[in-house]
Image (spheres, grey):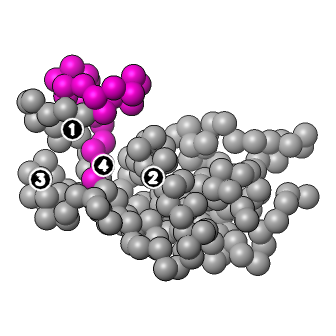
Amino acid sequence: MIAATEKLFSAPQVCEAAGCKQVTLRAWRRRNGLFPETLTDRRQNHFFSLRDVCMVRAIVVLTHHGLAADDAIRFAQDPTFGLRIESYIDSFLKVGTHTEDNVVGFFMGDASKPGDRILDWDSGQIVDAADRPPAKLTFLFFGAGAEPLISCLSNPTGAVTFVNMKTIVKHIVNALAPSSGEPG
């Protein structure tokens, strides 16, 4: 079984599965800093993990729906989303299409209110929201045991974008199925 973070896929495979052109992927990597740590071989061919391919697909979907590439890439590279999609891919690969839907809602800006206690990613501690700089993105997760959708929709900070991770992961797994394997 493939691991979500195992670097197996070449740039052409990524682009075909995710639905973007190679020039677009190169531009996102060079201009926007997408995947700076990508594994390369002696000929400087880049290899990507299943998690990376799913993130590229998420960026493609978001940009097709009108989100700026910079914002979509910031969303995809956020540690919150990265860890969430990685664990979802692992679950999807073990359980298959019977895995429950997992929806991520996000909006630009900070939704914390005075007195809120939040996880500080840098220290790993729960801190008062006022003790850290405002977030550039706010994520809300929906699905089994997660926050109800209505609480996100009642947030007055602006437009919310929703991404169903099951749809993205299923699309990528199906697109890569015939061509998956070790890089040559």
Q: Position of residue 12 (x, y in %)?
A: 74, 62
Residue 56 magenta-highlighted:
no
**Which residue carries the number 3 mark?**
155
Residue, x 56% and y 37% (percent of image)? 33
**Which residue carries the number 2 mark?**
84
The amino acid beneath tag 1 is Asp
Mark nearer the N terminus (1 vs 2): 2
**Which residue carries the number 1 mark?**
110
Q: Position of residue 9 (x, y in %)?
A: 75, 58
Mark 4–mark 2 distance (CA, rounded to whole Å): 11 Å
Task: Tell me the number on the disc at residue 102.
Answer: none
The answer to whether any part of residue 56 appears in the image is no
The amino acid beneath tag 3 is Asn
Mark 1–mark 3 distance (CA, rounded to whole Å): 11 Å
Tell me which segment is drawn in magenta.
119-140
The amino acid beneath tag 4 is Phe
- Look at the numbered discs 1 and 4 and tell me whether their residues touch, using CB distance below 8 Å: no
**Which residue carries the number 4 mark?**
139
The correct choice, above or below, for 49 with respect to 37 in the image is: below
Mark nearer the N terminus (1 vs 4): 1
Q: Position of residue 99 (x, y in %)?
A: 47, 74
The amino acid beneath tag 2 is Arg
Q: Give left or right: position of 74 versus 34.
A: left
Residue 135 magenta-highlighted:
yes
Extreme top residue here? 131
